[in-house]
């Protein structure tokens, strides 16, 4: 790889022509929806067994396109209506009031546990530990306000460069997303980080995450090499210690790519395997479909606006766009009211990814084909964000005058103002 030093500065991104695709909408039903659950109290006080008895003859028909992604989505029996959220509000009416603001999700103790029975631990306790991580590892959506020299696009350029480094050294997606978490949480806790230190921050975060996730991480000299002399080995080691102290050695978040991997496992776990942990030992899903979801997460992660949502919400919202809402809610334990703001925000990103078509798998000589989809690949260009911006403008324009559209559709006339009424 040719050495290169990234320049953190404002640049005009050239719009790249996008390939249009007529990919079919994926509607799938996870096998997890069909398993028999033990009776437990829901937030409304009615047991699931009782709700199932009251609506045992009511079913929600959902079509499954098994041809998409080479039959990766398995057909399943119809979904009982009691397993689907009945009071689902339209995105336009509900989620718009939460745009770019903090919101509260369903408390962790009320989210049902979708994990199978585990031989080595209590599945409910494991589930609660995973949920708590989204609450403990906090990132500040307004973190750049504490760094006057930094801009949102600088973070985007930095992450795009880190993806290139990960692909060159065959680092996993878990390593990359862990490094992104370290960067965001460090910027949330630190003050007045200069733009000349941003590349040092990024390569140090990747250095830490690679030692955490990789079996054979690259050497320190390799990380210094890719910066083309901008960061020395001594500077990386010094920055590593500063970051670890700032992060208080909290290095084990549940990132969005880890949530996505878990949701895919649960979605494709056989019904008979739900009584044991056999369904979680080996990947049960299509690697090709995995990279489609990962590409959407890669794109939204480049945007600093994604910091307003937790990692679990981001992964579940990607499921809403590429699979179905019922699947997302069943494997995550969220309700629609929790996902609606993020689903609406992610809409232009999902539309842009759909226009790009399916991304092809990349294989490497020193990586087994079964593990190739776990390698972080550089499939998202910075120019794609320009297309996302155009999509946002189109969606905003289409919703700019809802009252006028309603008058045209219904034929209703707006009464004149009182000052313009005729006396006669």
Image (spheres, rainbow, N blue to C red):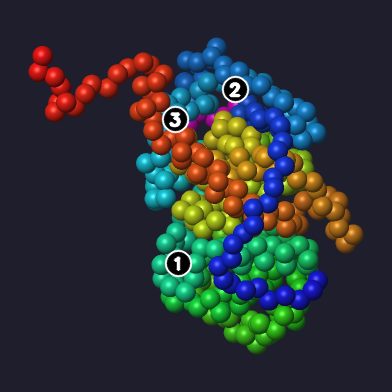
Q: Label 1's element? A: helix
Q: N-terminal of the two: label 2 or label 1?
A: 2
Q: Is residue 41 magenta?
A: yes
Tell me where residue 224 appears, x and y as whole percent.
71, 80
Q: Label 3's element? A: loop
Q: N-terminal of the two: label 2 or label 3?
A: 2
Tell me where residue 168 appears, x and y as whole percent.
78, 66
Residue at numbered disc 3: 90
Q: Which residues are magenta?
A: 36-42
Q: CA distance from mark 2 to mark 3?
A: 21 Å
Residue at numbered disc 1: 144
Around disc 1, counting alpha carbons within 10 Å, would you say few (fewer than 14), some (14 to 19), or many (20 or more)?
many
> Hey, which quadrant is residue 358 in on the image?
top right
Q: CA distance from mark 1 to mark 3?
A: 32 Å
Point out which mark residue 79 bears. 2
Which quadrant holds the N terminus?
bottom right
> Looking at the magenta stretch, what is its main secondary structure?
loop
Report whether residue 222 is seen: yes
């Amino acid at each position: 790889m040719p050495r290169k030093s990234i320049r953190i500065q404002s640049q005009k991104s050239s719009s790249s022509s996008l390939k249009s695709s007529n990919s079919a909408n994926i509607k799938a039903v996870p096998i997890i929806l069909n398993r028999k659950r033990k009776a437990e109290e829901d937030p409304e006080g009615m047991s699931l067994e009782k709700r199932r008895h009251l609506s045992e003859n009511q079913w929600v028909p959902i079509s499954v396109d098994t041809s998409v992604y080479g039959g990766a989505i398995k057909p399943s029996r119809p979904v009982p209506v009691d397993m689907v959220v009945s009071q689902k509000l339209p995105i336009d009416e509900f989620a718009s009031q939460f745009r770019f603001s903090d919101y509260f999700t369903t408390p962790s103790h009320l989210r049902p546990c979708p994990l199978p029975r585990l031989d080595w631990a209590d599945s409910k306790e494991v589930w609660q530990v995973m949920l708590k991580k989204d609450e403990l590892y906090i990132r500040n959506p307004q973190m750049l306000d504490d760094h006057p020299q930094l801009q949102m696009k600088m973070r985007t350029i930095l992450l795009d460069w880190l993806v290139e480094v990960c692909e060159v050294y065959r680092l996993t997606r878990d390593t990359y997303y862990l490094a992104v978490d370290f960067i965001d949480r460090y910027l949330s806790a630190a003050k007045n980080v200069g733009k000349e230190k941003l590349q040092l921050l990024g390569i140090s975060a990747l250095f830490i995450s690679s030692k955490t996730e990789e079996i054979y991480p690259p050497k320190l000299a390799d990380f210094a090499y890719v910066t083309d002399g901008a960061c020395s080995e001594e500077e990386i080691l010094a920055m590593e210690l500063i970051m670890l102290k700032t992060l208080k050695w909290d290095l084990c978040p549940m990132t969005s790519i880890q949530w996505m991997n878990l949701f895919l496992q649960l979605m494709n776990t056989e019904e008979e395997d739900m009584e044991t942990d056999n369904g979680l030992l080996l990947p049960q899903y299509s690697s090709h479909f995995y990279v489609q979801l990962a590409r959407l997460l890669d794109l939204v992660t480049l945007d600093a606006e994604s910091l307003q949502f937790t990692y679990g919400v981001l992964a579940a919202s990607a499921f809403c766009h590429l699979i179905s809402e019922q699947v997302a809610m069943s494997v995550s334990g969220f309700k629609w009211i929790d996902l609606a703001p993020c689903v609406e925000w992610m809409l232009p990103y999902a539309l842009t990814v759909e226009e790009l078509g399916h991304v092809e798998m990349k294989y490497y000589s020193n990586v087994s084909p079964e593990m190739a989809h776990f390698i972080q690949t550089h499939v998202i260009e910075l120019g794609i964000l320009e297309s996302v911006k155009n999509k946002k403008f189109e969606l905003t324009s289409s919703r700019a005058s809802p009252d006028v559209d309603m008058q045209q559709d219904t034929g209703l006339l707006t009464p004149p103002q009182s000052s313009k009424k005729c006396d006669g």
